[in-house]
Amino acid sequence: MNRVLIAEDLYLLREGLVHLLQAHGFEVVAAVESGPELLRGLLELRPDVSIVDVRLPPTFTDEGLQASLRARREVPGLPILVLSQHVEQLYARELLADGSGGIGYLLKDRVFNAEQFVDAVRRVAAGGTAMDPEVIAKLLAGNARNEPLAALTPREREVLEQMAEGRSNAAISQRLHLSESTVAKHTAGIFTKLGLAPSDDDNRRVLAVLAHLDSRQSS
């Protein structure tokens, strides 16, 4: 059973998350509403995964993000799933910077059903990624002029977006209606063009690709 901490200032949403996760077998170890409470809970409870709103009291700016980043500095790889109203590329860059895994970034109004959300929580708890397609699209668009990305074919960019969402080769094969061998070929080409060593670990390869793209955006 995964132990989860929830940080959300809106009471109805916070309680809704608690009941949803408990119904799917999670143990909710804490449900907090402010940045200081979140940081304390992360460091003291060491949850298997935390669901964090970016903007929390007292200032409603980036308390949730800053508490998460500080906790991950002290506990590398501490799994964090961020829920946000908007795509904040700076937030995505900071979260991905250490490349240690267990990161998600979902837009609240694009979580279409409970199963989709719970699957994302489990993926992050397992050390993987759960990135909203719109976040990935903005990262890719922001790097469109970079030579390595410009070298990707349209199909390779489609595969890269699926990889960044945390999908395995088998899942990408089903989504894009390609054979697994074709997906593997595209994946190998992506790694080569981006100068990244291929890896059999799907979660690590996604983090590597995202970190690579985002570091180029910030340079």
Image (cartoon, helix red, strand yellow):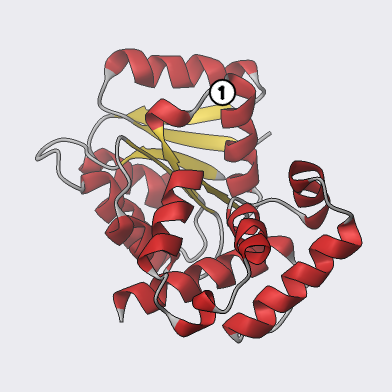
* Foreground of the two, 88 or 201: 88
Q: Nearer the viewer, residue 217 or 176?
A: 176
Q: Position of residue 56 (x, y in %)?
A: 21, 37
Q: In this image, 109 relative to 175: left or right?
A: left
Q: Residue furthest front?
A: 154
Residue 118 % position (x, y): 61, 30
Residue 104 or residue 163, whichever sits in front? 163
Can residue 47 be seen by looking at this rendering? Answer: no
Instruction: Residue 48: give x, y in percent of width and height.
Output: 57, 45
Q: Residue at x 64, y 24 (%)?
A: 115
Amino acid of disc 1: Leu
Asked where in the image residue 110 lies, by quadrant, the reply is top left
Q: Estimate how packed mark 1 is, as few (under 14), some (14 to 19) or many (20 or more) residues with alpha carbons within 10 Å.
A: many
Q: Which quadrant of the structure image shows residue 22? A: top right
Q: Is residue 42 above or below residue 55?
A: below
In percent of the image, x 64 and y 45: which residue is there?
Answer: 123
Q: Is residue 127 above or below residue 31?
A: below
**Image coords of residue 52 (percent x, y):** 37, 39
Look at 30% across and 75% down and name the residue there. 218
Q: Which residue is mark 1?
A: 21
Left or right for 207, reference 37: right
How many dots with numbers?
1
- Write the residue at 67% across / 59% down: 159
In the visual, does 188 lie left or right of 108? right
